[in-house]
Image (spheres, rainbow, N blue to C red):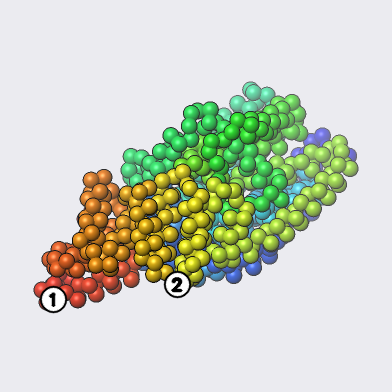
Amino acid sequence: MSPIADPGSLPSQSLHGALPPLLLAGLCALAALAVYWPGQENGFIWDDLSYLVHSPAFRDPAQWKEALFSPPTGEAVFRPLTLLSFATQLWAGQTGPAPFHVANFLIHAVNVILVTLLAYRMVGRNSPAGVGAVSVLLCGLVYGLHPALTEPVLWIAGRFDLLMAMFLLLALLLDHALPAASWRRALGVSLLFYVALLSKETAVGFLLALPLMHLAADRGPGPLRLAAAARVLASHRRVYAGLLLALGAYLLLRLAVLGPYLGMDRVMARYDSIGPPVQRMSVVAASLAQYLMDTVWIAGGFAPNRALPLPVDGLSAALAAATVAAVVILACGAIRFTAAGRAPGALALAFLAALLPVSNIVPAPTYADELQIASRYLAFPLVFACLALATLPPMLAVRHTSAVKLFWIAAGVWTIASGVIVRTTIPMWRDEGIFFRWAIARSGPTSWRYLYINLGAHYLRVGELSSARDAFMRAAELQPKSARLASIAWYNVGNAEAKLGNAEQAAHAFRVALSFDPDNVYARAGLAEIERTQGRAGRAAALLEEALERLRAAGRVHPDRGLLHLRLGLAYADLARRDEAVRELTLAGGLVRQQALRVAAEEALRALSGPVREATKMPSQGPQ
């Protein structure tokens, strides 16, 4: 193949004349769908249950506001558009897991099409037909079959990342399709960015990555000098201004819904547990290095929600910083000193820039001695890595024709291996028992603590009580440094023991849970119920009164405070304090979220004498 002095001078050899880009995109999407399709038989996993099974708000259109703005996974999750997609499917009667899995697969297929078309616009139409076609095909297949994306595709709750990536990809395509000075371009890109933010807040990385994308797409001659880079970026100023306005509108909406802390109270409180600024920088470097490894080394395995143990030791931090610095230096060198290296270099920097919001600059809301690293966070940043990969064959073809063939062979083997890994990973997400055992086997001791808790919760749901108790006890034995996590572990031990009929062991576990966290509502309610059923209703009432008083004093409104009112009403009934029992049970009827508890409150009210029945007609409003 002869050298290419000016790629734009070869329209007769364009990709469009060889294979239509939509055909290539469709082939890549079909390949991804074919590999993932068996996953539709998988069940609900982990947070899927919180949204799609246990939350009444998502099944009742009348409770749309709670579903969209008060999700069960916490106030930091301000993602109303993705939550609306969950609710809409439930409202349409799709209550089983299969339709939700298929929806995820289809969104991923759309993303594969968009990535492939983006590769065509950046690479394919300016390259010789053969090299361009294969480069575009490679980009789509690598993105569609990359094992790092098994988490957002196979996990229904990973849809946050899939939808965010879809809208940002549409923004990138629109950005390339319209003239730089067009107001329509600025408006369209900004609106898509705004919608992406409403899908997941980490879309903010688009602000950092887009200018680098513009540098990568620039076709100016020779290496990129600072003056030329400034001119390129200045030509897109309308888009940048629109994006900043969209970000401001999003923050105002979040402020209006969540208050002055934007729902980030718990997240920002994590800074103290990380340590001094040097440790914070080490955390960011370690996170970025792990994502780089996930992108390149697909055989490393992708356990879900991996933990980054704190503190990060000096050697690990130094190696991570050196890895990230090497990528940055190589990319900057390629941009500054070579014309052919401008696109891959700028795209590599865009990849890192898009990763910054998920690299624990703002710490993930986990537990005291760890931070979170999840491969689903790669759903959007990986786009830039795949585009950078697609720019390499045309660049090599200019002077090293034989190197291109070796590149195709290596890329082909890598892509086939990716598909095999994805296919073998699908059964690991089949049900929670398989999933959590697999996650424990692939994770480190820091992650084991909450993974054992989740495994125990699965055993409880399927009625394997002894296995549940053993899993919870294993979590407790790992001695979590987080008092909250330790309290959760011991509460669950007590809950399993209570279901097994071991009242004394259950009471002991509940007391240990309260020693770690006196405000553990569930442990206090569990201990009170044991006291009451053992004939000590006075002790039960005192425990519950103290719990409610602690909530009032702290100004907290616990979502399950209705459980405390229910247990207190039953204790008052046992103590023949009928009027107080009526009051508490009536409050409970309006506050408890589970149907079984609501029925229990109603039955207890009916069991009381005549005048009490009138109380059931009172408005079911609890304390706000």
| Up/down of 454 relative to 251, above or below | below
Q: Amino acid at mark 1?
A: Ser
Q: Residue 238: x percent and y percent?
A: 51, 35
First reached walking from the N terminus: tag 1 or tag 2: 2
Residue 15 visible in the displayed image? no
The residue singled out by tag 2 in the image is 93
Where residue 5 appears, as percent x and y from the top left, is 82, 34
Determine which of the numbered discs, if any, sits on residue 393 in the image: none
Which three-letter amino acid code belongs to the residue tagged 2? Gly
- The picture places residue 116, in percent across and down from the top left corner, at 68, 52
* Residue placed most toward the observer, 289 or 448: 448
Residue at image location 75% in from the left, 29% down from the top: 338
Q: Give me the residue at 76% from left, 34% from top.
A: 340
Which residue is most to the front? 504
Identify whether 454 is placed above or below 272. below
Name of the residue lying farthest toward the left: 611
Label 2 neighbourhood size at 10 Å, few (<14), some (14-19), many (20+)? few
- Tell me where residue 408 appears, x and y as whole percent: 82, 49
Which corner quadrant of the image does residue 528 belong to? bottom left
